[in-house]
Image (tube, rainbow, N blue to C red):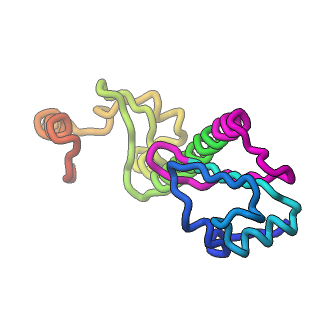
C-alpha cells in the first residue's frame, strides 16, 4: 500500500472533529480537491465518507471510507461506521494510555531514588529496584510482606506521622527529605 499524509489533501483542512464529511460523488462534488479526486479515481472510488475519531475532547484521527457506488453512505451505514469510529477511538486512546503507563512504570522502576507505593495503613504495594536494594530486599514479592514503618527509625516515624502524612492529606503532597 501507499502511505498518504493529510498534508497532501486540501480537503483535510476542511474537516472538524464534530462533523462527518460525506460526498455522494467525489467526481462532481465541488468540495473535493484535485489530489483527493485523483486518488479516488485511481482506486475506483466514487462515494467518500470521513468520520472523526474522537475520545473525550481529543481528536485522534479519522475513519476514511470510500465506495465504488455513488451515494453509498446512507443513514444506516453511517450509523454503523460512526460506531466503528467511536470504538476505534476508544481503542486508540486505551493503547496510548497503556503506552504512557508503561513508560511511567519503567521510569519508576529504573529510578535511582527509593520509590514505593503503600496503603494508608502502610502496607507496601510496590517498591522499585533502587528501594529494594537500599533496604536489602532481593525481590518485589519480599517487599510486599513489609510495611512503610519497617523502613523508618522511631524518630523518622514520629516525624512522618506528625508532619508528612498530615501535609499529604491536606495538600496532596509533601516535599522534603527524611
Q: Taking 43 as reference, is 178 above or below it?
A: above
Q: Is residue 65 left or right of residue 136?
A: right
Image quadrant occupied by the N terminus? bottom right
Q: Residue furthest top?
A: 121
Examine the rendering and report whether any part of residue 152 can be seen: yes
The residue positioned 60% from the left and 65% from the top of the image is 12
Q: Residue 17 location, x and y as percent? A: 51, 52
Name the residue nearer the viewer: 81 or 121: 81
Name the residue nearer the viewer: 142 or 169: 169
The residue positioned 77% from the left and 54% from the top of the image is 47
Residue 49 part of the magenta segment: no
Q: Taking 149 as reference, is 112 above or below it?
A: below
Magenta segment, which residues? 54-83
Q: Residue 37 location, x and y as percent? A: 76, 69
| Quarter occupied by residue 125 | top left
Examine the rendering and report whether any part of residue 109 can be seen: no
Q: Is residue 73 left or right of residue 118?
A: right
The residue positioned 67% from the left and 72% from the top of the image is 33
Name the residue nearer the viewer: 118 or 38: 38
Residue 70 part of the magenta segment: yes
The residue positioned 56% from the left and 46% from the top of the image is 93
Q: Is residue 95 left or right of residue 174?
A: right
Amino acid at each position: 500500500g501507499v502511505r498518504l499524509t493529510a498534508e497532501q489533501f486540501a480537503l483535510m483542512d476542511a474537516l472538524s472533529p464534530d462533523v462527518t464529511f460525506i460526498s455522494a460523488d467525489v467526481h462532481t462534488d465541488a468540495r473535493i480537491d484535485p489530489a483527493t479526486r485523483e486518488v479516488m479515481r485511481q482506486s475506483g472510488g466514487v462515494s467518500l465518507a470521513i468520520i472523526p475519531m474522537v475520545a473525550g475532547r481529543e481528536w485522534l484521527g479519522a475513519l476514511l471510507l470510500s465506495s465504488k457506488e455513488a451515494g453509498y453512505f446512507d443513514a444506516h451505514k453511517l450509523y454503523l461506521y460512526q460506531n466503528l469510529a467511536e470504538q476505534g477511538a476508544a481503542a486508540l486512546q486505551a493503547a496510548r494510555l497503556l503506552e504512557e503507563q508503561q513508560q511511567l512504570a519503567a521510569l519508576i522502576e529504573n529510578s535511582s531514588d527509593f520509590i514505593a507505593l503503600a496503603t494508608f495503613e502502610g502496607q507496601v504495594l510496590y517498591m522499585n529496584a533502587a528501594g529494594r536494594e537500599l533496604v536489602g530486599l532481593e525481590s518485589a514479592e519480599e517487599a510486599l510482606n513489609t510495611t512503610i514503618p519497617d523502613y523508618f527509625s522511631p524518630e523518622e516515624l514520629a516525624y512522618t506521622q506528625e508532619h508528612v502524612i498530615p501535609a499529604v492529606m491536606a495538600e496532596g503532597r509533601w516535599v522534603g527529605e527524611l
